[in-house]
Amino acid sequence: MLRKTHVRLTNLLGEGSNLTIHCKSKDDDLGVHVLPFKGSFEWSFKPNFFVKNTLFFCNIQWQGKSMYFNSYDEERDLDGCGKYCYWDVTLKGPCLLKHEGGYDFCSDWPNKKKVGIKQGDGKNMP
């Protein structure tokens, strides 16, 4: 049986900057949340052991920019994140933290207002 996995998004966009997030999976809608600077939103779940297809994606919005990214993709993250997948949303975009410090990778904010940005292979992106 798989242990619980924890995903956290933290707003590191700067003092006075609010980040609006809406995360969901095929089965769970986690709702819309507005995070102040240094504010976080975290959830936990048990990945699908047999099929290995657990996927959570988020829409994040800040200063007229909007993007989707896979906040948890079991194929990508089961071995990579382990049970803690922590994201910092920065001026560069959402960045996945490495356990040993620094970032594993970041996705850039799009130039257009509503663009779907793929991470990993982009499966199940809206």
Image (tube, rainbow, N blue to C red):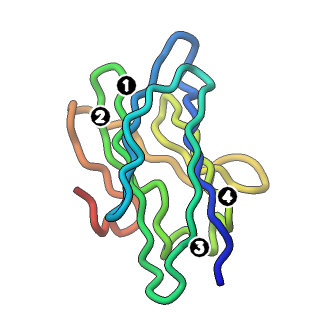
Q: CA distance from mark 2 to mark 4?
A: 25 Å
**Residue drawn at 26 percent across, 32 percent down:** 111
Q: Earlier in the sequence, mark 3 or mark 2?
A: 2
Tell me the number on the disc at residue 66: 2
Name the residue type under label 4.
Tyr
Name the residue type under label 2.
Ser
Badge 1 element = strand
Q: For mark 4, does the 10 Å Cα neighbourhood hold few (<14), some (14 to 19), or many (20 or more) residues? A: some
Disc 4 target residue: 84
Q: Earlier in the sequence, mark 2 or mark 4?
A: 2
Q: For mark 1, does the 10 Å Cα neighbourhood hold few (<14), some (14 to 19), or many (20 or more) residues? A: some
Disc 3 target residue: 78
Q: For mark 3, does the 10 Å Cα neighbourhood hold few (<14), some (14 to 19), or many (20 or more) residues? A: some
Q: CA distance from mark 1 to mark 2?
A: 7 Å
**Residue drawn at 79 percent across, 55 percent down:** 100
Disc 1 target residue: 62
Q: Earlier in the sequence, mark 1 or mark 4?
A: 1
- Number of callouts: 4
Q: CA distance from mark 1 to mark 3?
A: 29 Å
Q: Nearer the viewer, mark 1 or mark 4?
A: 4
| Residue 32 percent location from the top left of the image | 37, 35
Tell me the number on the disc at residue 35: none
> Is 35 situated left or right of 23 in this image?
right
Name the residue type under label 1.
Trp
Question: Vertical placement of 101 versus 51: above or below?
Answer: above
